[in-house]
């Protein structure tokens, strides 16, 4: 695309359908439509959820460690409520931290057992957070998500027998 002078969406939109299909074949038609926000694919509203989480961007960057931990606890509460609402739990917790310079890092930990209780979410998020070298940096965003979701509620589990 760069050889044709197409470096941005605006460049792509400036090309005709004929020109794009000549250079790219069938996919040229797709490029033409996408550059014009035309998407005829069916919306799939009932797809399987892959993660549940919450994050907060702060109007004023956090520089106080106690404030950071308090915000982390509040985010953990939201995540726990969402897990409860969806009647699920997860096994991998991911902590997202964006600093005031927009550098972003994530830290994850996977548990052998399902995580859905506030205490477990808070403890794991806090442990991951404490492992981050802040170096007197302020934080613009904090987030927690759980993935590797268990889509079956505990009351739906059935113990299988090896002897049946």
Image (spheres, grey):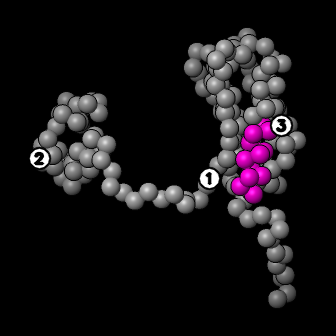
Secondary structure beneath label 1? loop
Q: Which mark is residue 50?
A: 1
Q: Which mark is residue 18?
A: 2
| Position of residue 123 measured from the top left corner of the image (x, y, whole percent) | 85, 37
Q: Residue at x 31, y 43 (%)?
A: 37
Residue that mark 3 sits on: 122
Above-or-below relation of 97 to 84: above
Q: Residue at x 23, y 36 (%)?
A: 12
Q: Main secondary structure of the magenta part?
A: helix
Does residue 85 show up magenta in the picture?
Answer: yes
Q: Residue at x 79, y 70 (%)?
A: 156
| CB-based contact (under 8 Å), mark 3 and mark 2 | no
Q: Is residue 141 left or right of residue 1?
A: right
Quadrant of the drawing holding the N terminus: top left
Q: CA distance from mark 3 to mark 1?
A: 20 Å
Secondary structure beneath label 3? helix
Pick whichever of labels 2 and 1 is earlier in the sequence.
2
Q: Residue at x 51, y 57 (%)?
A: 45
């Amino acid at each position: 695309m760069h050889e044709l002078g197409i470096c941005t969406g605006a460049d792509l939109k400036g090309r005709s359908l004929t020109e794009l299909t000549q250079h790219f074949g069938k996919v040229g038609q797709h490029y033409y439509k996408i550059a014009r926000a035309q998407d005829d694919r069916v919306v799939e509203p009932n797809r399987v959820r892959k993660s549940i989480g919450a994050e907060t961007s702060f109007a004023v960057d956090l520089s106080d460690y106690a404030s950071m931990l308090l915000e982390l606890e509040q985010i953990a509460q939201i995540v726990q409520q969402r897990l409860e609402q969806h009647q699920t739990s997860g096994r991998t917790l991911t902590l997202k931290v964006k600093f005031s310079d927009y550098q972003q890092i994530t830290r994850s930990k996977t548990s052998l057992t399902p995580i859905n209780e506030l205490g477990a979410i808070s403890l794991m998020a806090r442990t991951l957070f404490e492992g981050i070298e802040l170096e007197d940096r302020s934080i613009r965003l904090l987030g927690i998500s759980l993935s590797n979701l268990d889509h079956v509620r505990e009351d739906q589990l059935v113990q299988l027998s090896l002897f049946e």
